[in-house]
Amino acid sequence: MILFLARRILSRVNALSSIPSTVDVAADCPETAYPRDSAVLLSQQVLRTDVAGMPLEWIDYKEAVRLYHTEQVAYACGSPLYRLRGGINARSGRRTVVEVSSIIATIGHSSNPGTLRSDYVPPLNNETLFKRDAYLCMYCGIRFPSQQLSRDHVRPFCRGGQNIWTNVVTACRRCNNAKAYRTPEEARMHLLAVPFTPTYAEYIYLKGRRVLADQMQYLLAHFPRSSPLHVRIREWLN
Ligand SMILES: [Zn+2]
C-alpha cells in the first residue's frame, strides 16, 4: 500500500523513469567510478527518501552504491546520474554495473525527523536562511550574493527577540545597518514577507547543492501548498 502511494506521488510529478528490481554488484566490487560526462557529475548529490517516498537526506554516490550493494534500495526514480562499474562477478562472469538515479527510495524505518516529531524545527544557519528567502533582502527586495547578505532579527536580539526561524529574515548589509536595533515599525521599514519555519522537506531542499530539476519537482510536491517557496523558487528560476 505504501509503495503504491509512493508510486502515485511519483507519477504525479512525472519523475518516475525506472524501477530496477535487482542490481548486479559483486561482493568485492571496487569503487571504480566512470562518470558519464565529467567529475562534476560525480559530485552531484542523490536524494534519498524512505520507502513511502518522504525525502530524507542528500547522499553522495558512494553512499548510494553502498545502499544498492546492501539491497536497501526499494526503487529508484528521477534521471540516471551515474553508471559505476566494478569487478567481474565470479558466478556470472560479467562485469558488475550499478546505475544510480537522482532519487532513490530506501527500505527500513524512516529516519525523517519531520515525521517522527511533530514539533521538529530544522537547525537555523545563514546558508539555509538566505536560500529560504531566495537571496532577497526582505526589506529592499534586491537579490544579492550570499556574501553580501546578513541575518536580521525582526525583533532585535538585544531586545528579547529570539534567534528562531520566525524572527529572522535575510537582509542586505545596508538595510540591516539602517534598521539597527529597532523593529521594522520603529525604523519605518516594510518587511516584504513573514518569516516562516521550513518543514523537513523544505529544509532538505534548502540544504541541497545544485538541486536537479527532477529532484526539485519531487521536493516541491512535498512542500505544503501554502509554502512561500513555491513562488520564490519559480520567480528565482525565471
Ligand atoms: Zn536591503
Image: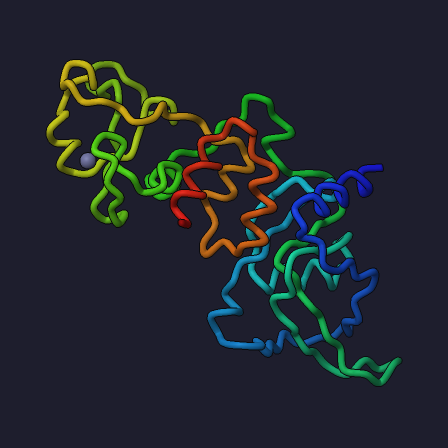
- State ligand 1's quadrant: top left
Would you identify the image quadrant in which residue 46 lies? bottom right
Q: Is residue 51 above or below residue 160?
A: below
| Residue in front for this viewpoint, 21 or 119 | 21
Residue 4, image quadrant? top right
Which residue is drawn at the image coordinates 80% and 38% (left, top)?
2
Quarter that holds the N terminus: top right
Residue 56 or residue 135, whichever sits in front: 135
- 142 sits left or right of 102 in the view: left
Q: Position of residue 216 (x, y in %)?
A: 54, 48
Answer left or right for 172 relative to 199. left
Determine the residue positioned at 44% across, 43% down. Answer: 233
Using the image as rendered, state which of residue 198 and residue 24 is in the foreground: 198
Residue shown at the point (35%, 36%) measured from the top left: 133
Q: Farthest right residue?
A: 91
Percent across and percent down for residue 60 are 56, 60
Determine the image quadrant of residue 87. Answer: bottom right
Looking at the image, the residue that sits furthest to the left is: 178
Residue lying farthest to the front in this orientation: 238
Residue 58 percent location from the top left of the image:
55, 51
Picture coordinates of residue 134 (x, y %)?
36, 41
Q: Is residue 11 left or right of residue 116?
A: right
